[in-house]
Image (cartoon, rainbow, N blue to C red):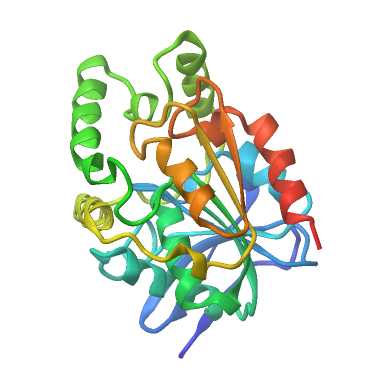
Amino acid sequence: MNARETRGDGDVVTSYKHAQTRTVTADGVTFAYRDLGPRTGVPVIFITHLAAVLDNWDPRVVDGIAAKHRVITFDNRGVGASTGKTPKTIEEMARDAATFIRALGLEQVDVLGLSMGGMVAQVIAETDPQLIRRLILAGTGPAGGEGIKNVTRIAHFDTVRALLTLQDVKQFLFFTRTPNGIRAGKEFLARLKERTEDRDKAIRPTSYFSQLKAVHRWGLAQPQDLSRIQQPVLVANGDDDRMVPTPNSHDLARRLPNAELVIYPDGGHGGVFQYHEQFVPTALEFLGRP
């Protein structure tokens, strides 16, 4: 592996709003990433959801975890400011994510994977088990999981709804349509705008459609033997996830041998963002165990 990293000054950053965008090059791909929090202990790698770039992570979740752990967010191949062509399978995305982790010289990490990122995290845990110590799987499901093959249809439908009502599509995809969910969505979207400088590039349409194909294939795939994932896993979701239906979270918790489950009431696909005040302490307690 030929890895080259460019870094800014050596200051430790504790706020995602001010985390510098850096790059590391490995296997012909230049990965964009942000790195914050203390430099002790096991780093936590955040793996993003469908269509997400660096600026789609809720700063309350990032900053909350980074108060105790080193947090690294990144754009996988072909996404945002990272170079290359976006893969059309979750398995290829997992290989690229593992390449990125190793390019930073990290031998073991914890992973927080959201939605598509949780699918990628499951594959890494199977193919590179020595690389992962603990897993947090949020708003995601197993291969062949209930309703995952419908993500493309739901995403297209909600995109039209968003255009017709002049709203952000995440208001529909990530949050319930109750007063509580609508309010939480607006607050989340406002938090995403707190960073005003050095913002990431938006995802390209070609990359987005490649990701949709990857998730669709994951939804049609044969169920995998999740008993091979021996790491401790925290599974989290809202109780009304339309994108990756909540029964998938229950399924993961049943089939993973060392899992625990947290379900947030009146929560959707973005339940960990909506309930960040409850999720962050739960995640910190989980990650902080010996």
Q: Is residue 38 left or right of residue 3?
A: right
| Residue 244: % across, % down | 36, 40
Residue at the image position 61 percent from the left and 29 percent from the top: 275
Q: Residue furthest bottom?
A: 1
Q: Residue at x 27, y 40 (%)?
A: 147
21 vs 276, nearest the viewer? 276
The spot of residue 289 in percent (x, y) is 79, 57
Left or right placement of residue 267 versus residue 39 in this view: left
Residue at the spot 53% in from the left edge and 80% down from the top edge: 103
- Quadrant position of the C terminus in the picture: bottom right
Instruction: Tell me, yes or no, if residue 56 can be seen here.
Output: no
Q: Is residue 121 above or below residue 54?
A: below
Looking at the image, is 193 positioned above or below residue 149? above
Label count reads: 0
* Residue at the far top in the pictured view: 179
Q: Nearer the viewer, residue 98 or 121?
A: 121
Residue at the (39%, 54%) spot, across then down:
142
User: Vertically, is 175 above or below 137?
Assistant: above
In this rendering, the answer to whether 145 lies above or below 71 is above
Is residue 164 visible in this depiction of the protein?
yes
In the rendered image, residue 69, in percent from the top left (x then y), is placed at: 74, 57
Percent across and percent down for residue 150 are: 22, 40
> Looking at the image, which is closer to me, 225 or 211?
225
Task: Judge from the rendering whether residue 207 lies leftward or rightward of residue 64; answer left or right.
Answer: left
